Amino acid sequence: MSAPSAARLGPAGMCVLALGFAFIYAPILLIVVYSFNASKLVTVWGGFSLRWYPALLENRQLLDSAFMSLKVALASGALATLLGGLAGLALARRGSRGRSALAALVYAPLVMPEAMIGLALLLLFVALGVERGFLTIVIAHATLGMCFVALVVAARMKTFDASLREAAMDLGAGPFTAFRTITLPLIAPALVAGFLLAFTISLDDVVLATFASGPGATTLPMRIYSQMRLGVTPEINAVSTLILCSAAALAGAALILARILRHGAR
C-alpha cells in the first residue's frame, strides 16, 4: 500500500486494517512461537526450547504425512497449472465456439461444495476401479486448482496485446514459435501466480483428500484433523512451522522467477 493510500485511510481505517491483519496472521505466529515451547502442553508457555524439532524426527507418521502433502501439492500444482493454463487461453479467445460451455465447466468447481466434488470423484474412482492413493489425491486437488489457474490466466489474457503475436506470425513465425516466444513469456507471471494458488490450496485441503485418499496416503491436514480428538501435540506445531517456512521459501522463489520473466518479456 502506497503512502498516499495509507494516508487516506485515516487513524480509524488504519486501526481496522491492523486488526484485520492481526486476526489473520496472529494464529500463524502463535504456532511458530509455541513450536519453541518447552512445555508438553501447547497452550502453556514453559520457556524456550528446541526439544520438539528433534522429537519430530522420531515421529515417522507425522513426517510421512508432511512429505506426502508436499509431494501432492507440487504434483497437483504442476498439473493444475498445465490444464488451467490451457483452459485460460481457450477462454480468452473471443468468438470461439463452446466458450460459454467451457467457462461453465471450468468455473463450476469454484461454486460447488468441496464435499460434493469429493463425493463425485470418489464415485468416479470406484466406478473405474482405480486404487485410491497418491495419484487420486493429485487428480482431486488439480481439479480444483486448475479453476483458479484458468481464472488468473484468462484475466491476464484480457490485457494481452494480440498484435504482438500477429506481428511475429507476419514475420514468419509459426503458431508454436509465436506462442513460445511471445505469448508464454507474457503470461508466465500469471502461470506462476496460478501455481502458487494451486499449491497453497492443495497444501491445506482436507475435504477432497479425505474422499480421494486411501490406505498409506495420508496428508498432513488429514493427520492433524485425526489427532484433534486426542489433542494437538507440540510436534504438530514444529512440523507446521517447517511447512510454513518451506511454503514461504517456495513463494519467494516463485515471485523472484516471475519478476525475472516479467523483465525478460519487456
Image (cartoon, rainbow, N blue to C red):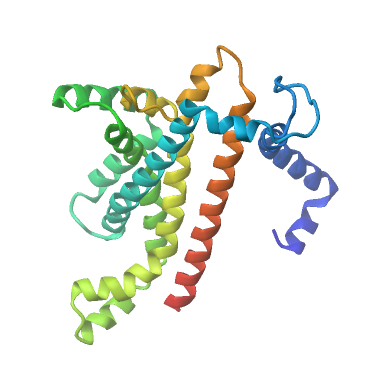
Instruction: Work out which residue is located at the far bottom of the displayed protein and give it.
Output: 171
Q: Nearest the camera: 248 or 234? A: 234
Residue nearest the viewer, comparing 22 with 93: 22
Residue 229 seen anywhere in this rendered image of the structure: yes
Q: Is residue 90 left or right of residue 155?
A: left
Q: In the image, is 91 to the left or to the right of 53?
A: left
Going by the picture, which residue comes out furthest to the left? 128
Q: Position of residue 43 (x, y in %)?
A: 73, 22
Position above or below: 262 against 252: below
Screen quadrant of the C terminus = bottom left
Comparing 105 with 265, the one in front is 265
Q: Residue at horizontal 19%, vertical 85%?
A: 172
Whether residue 1 sits left or right of residue 85 in the image: it is: right
Task: Estimate the x, y position of residue 65 in percent, counting from the top left.
Answer: 44, 31
The residue drawn where x is 70% and y is 42% is 21
**Residue 257 appears left or right of 26:** left
Against 175, residue 206 (above or below) is above
Q: Position of residue 63 (x, y in %)?
A: 48, 33
Q: Name the outermost residue toward the top.
A: 229
Quarter that holds the N terminus: bottom right
Q: Among all residues in the image, which is located at the extreme right?
A: 11
Q: Is residue 35 above or below residue 93?
A: above
Quadrant in which residue 91 is drawn = bottom left
Residue drawn at (55%, 53%) of the image: 249
The residue that appears at 38% across and 50% down in the rendered structure is 149
Image quarter of residue 12? top right
Residue 80 in picture, x, y percent from top left:
33, 47
Question: Residue 42 lies in what quarter of the image?
Answer: top right
